[in-house]
Amino acid sequence: MHTTSGKQVSMLRSIAVRWLFKGALALVGVMAVACSATPQVERVTVSEWSFRLDHSSVPAGQVTLEAVNQGQATHEMVLLKTDLPTNALKVKANGAEVDESASGEIMGEVEDLRPGQTKSVTVNLAPGRYVLTCNLLGHYNAGMVTEFTVTSS
Ligand SMILES: [Cu+2]
């Protein structure tokens, strides 16, 4: 008959404790990564013919822009990093659409945002000045543009 000696038991225990400890450390590591990667959420209220942000500035890092369409029409939200004033973005030859790449660096976009819908885009933002616009035909001209600042965190 095989019996486990006291020495073997204590050895097994110490192995088990070591594994548990490693597991706990790994878990703490995962949680720390999850926390640091959690983006801050900035709500953007979209309607005819405006964008409204809850804050005029946000700290740098991962930012989720949550666009809520409270209007009656379909819209979109284009995020540009630019120093151009909101009323002086470059427009295309038709005069009714923003020339996005000529106006700044395209950082992200939410398309086909229907009335009542909420859609989000998560972006990693460096300090600087940013502009949100809707680039459906004529919507920029109608006033669908706003700006915000990203501050060093
Ligand atoms: Cu629009």
Image (cartoon, rainbow, N blue to C red):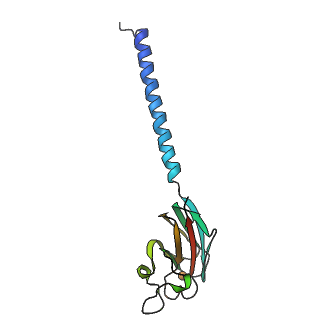
Residue displayed at 43% across by 9% down: 6
Q: Position of residue 85 (x, y in %)?
A: 54, 81
Quadrant placement of the C terminus: bottom right
Can you say whether 42 is above or below 5 in the image?
below
Taking the view exactly as shown, the residue that stands out farthest to the right is 54
Residue placed furthest toward the left = 1
Q: In which quarter of the image is residue 3?
A: top left
**How many numbered discs, if any?**
0
Where on the image, by quarter, is ligand 1? Answer: bottom right
Closer to the camera in the image, 27 or 100: 100
Q: Which quarter of the rendered picture does the N terminus lie within?
A: top left
**Residue 88: % across, % down:** 52, 86
Q: Nearer the viewer, residue 34 or 99?
A: 99
| Rendering coords of residue 146 (x, y %) | 58, 77
Residue 79 image point, x, y percent = 49, 73
Q: In this view, does 123 lie above or below 11?
A: below
Residue located farthest toward the bottom when viewing the structure as drawn:
94
Identify the residue at image location x=44%, y=24%: 16
**Residue closest to the eye, 118 or 63:** 63
Q: In front here: 83 or 118?
A: 83
